[in-house]
Image (cartoon, rainbow, N blue to C red):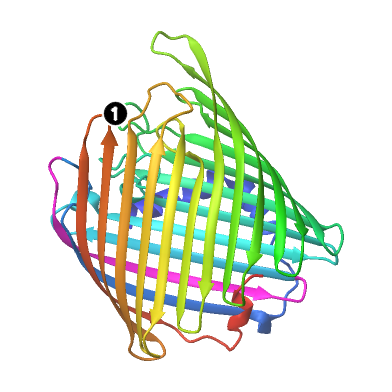
Amino acid sequence: MTALGQALPRLLRDRRTAFLLMALAVPLHVGADQWYFEPRASLDTFYDTNVRLLSEDAIASPGVKARVHLKGGERTETSDVALDASVVAWRYADAPAYDSNDLFIDLTAVHKRERDRFALNGRIDYDSTATSELETSGRVQANKRRERLYVAPSWVHLLSERATVEARASYADVRYEDAGPLTGLTDYTYVTGGLVGTYLLGETTSATTRLSFDRYDASTIPSTVDSVGISVGVRRAFSETLSGWAELGVRYSESTYLSAAGNTTGQTDTGPIAELGLDWRGETTSVLASLRRALVPSGNGELLDTTRTSLSVRQDLSPRWSVLASLSAVRNRDDTGGPEKSEDRDYVSFEPSVRYRLTEWWELRGSYRYRSQAYEPSGRSADSHAVFLSISYTWPREPVAQWSELE
């Protein structure tokens, strides 16, 4: 825990302003009986055939993963506050260079008035590039530390019984240990803003129009990408258990960067914005499927044109037994330009699992995970097979569980 203990004071010192803004969102006058607190702990044992997910010099290793999760919050008639904090320790018997101690803190604060809803979401990540870069740049060759601060305020205003307008923004500051040419990673900031109008067409159908702006700035290269987009969408509840949504649009991007010759150059690019999804929730079965295409920030100095498909399924066989499965497929293409064009990459992760509830508080879980990634045009590819067996315990809390779920 030494590295984590050294990094946390630095995170607090460097970003005290953002923490202050997040703290201001927490209501000062709340009743003690409205708070809840729920600790959770889990221990996983595993074996992974390719810890680093590399095409050459693959390392197989058994290991353990220990996680402590603290969840708390409060809810009143006009405000919600939820705080999640997790410490995760990874240990590899045959790959000690990939041992890590990770920290994650999430804050969500909401204040509601008669016609307005104000919200602030914040997150702090202190983790390893071996996991954090898998679904963005894919640069997982080295176990470098990543520090990420994310703050996102939003405001929703009710114009009428049918129409609402929402203003939202976000700021992300990402820093890497030993960022530079040797690791292929660069520090960056990512700022977004947008306006969303929603109109209720009927009892089960709503339409949306979205305007967005993104700015990616990797100042150490230097490299910047500015992007604007517009999209329209529709959401419909087909029944009490099935709902779906679709959003389509277009974006325009301008990038500037320093060429190998030392000259500032630029590039323009257009591309689609798309999001499709289905959500089915039955008494014992739930299915969530989505497809999304958008620009995603990465640590390689560029915004990546990313298409992401995800599927999650849960089937409760009995009050104690459940079967779960998740699938994620990511297609990264570098179309916005940059100081050094990246290889295109495809990444797939599939994880089925079985869960058994020993008691109300104890739970056993066994799972298998398959991962693969392939690069073009080099043809490099790698895959990994892993099995996990975990046990977890959730401490009882006061009967106010419904307060932990934000509307």
- The percent position of residue 207, horizontal first and vertical second, equals 71, 55
Quick one: SS at disc 1?
A: loop
Residue 58 sits above or below residue 359 on the image: above
User: Can residue 31 be seen at all in this image of the molecule?
Assistant: yes
User: Where does the image place residue 60, in percent across and percent down from the top left?
Assistant: 13, 54
Decide whether the magenta segment is chiefly helix, strand or loop: strand
Residue at (22% x, 48% y) in the render:
52
Query: Depth check: 82 or 252 in front?
Result: 252
Q: Is residue 364 left or right of residue 239?
A: left
Q: Quadrant of residue 366?
A: bottom left
Q: Which residue appears at 39% of the width and 39% of the height?
A: 332
Q: Quadrant of the C terminus?
A: bottom right
State left or right for residue 36 relative to residue 53. Answer: right
Instruction: Please provide percent x and percent y for residue 265.
Output: 50, 13
| Residue 233 or residue 223, whichever sits in front | 233
At which x and y percent is residue 33? 67, 84
Q: Is residue 142 visible?
A: no
Which stretch did the figure color magenta? 56-78
Q: Is residue 314 above or below residue 53?
A: below
Q: Can residue 67 be found in the magenta stretch? A: yes
Q: Which image quadrant is residue 113 in? A: bottom right
Q: Nearer the viewer, residue 353 or 128?
A: 353
**What residue sits 23% from the left and 60% below the top?**
91
**Disc 1 designates what residue?**
182
Question: In the image shown, does 23 or 253 lie closer to the viewer?
Answer: 253
Left or right: residue 346 compared with residue 45: right
Q: Is residue 166 magenta?
A: no
User: Quick one: quadrant of the N terminus?
Assistant: bottom left
- Does residue 29 appear left or right of residue 127 in this picture? right
Instruction: Report the amino acid beneath label 1.
Output: Leu
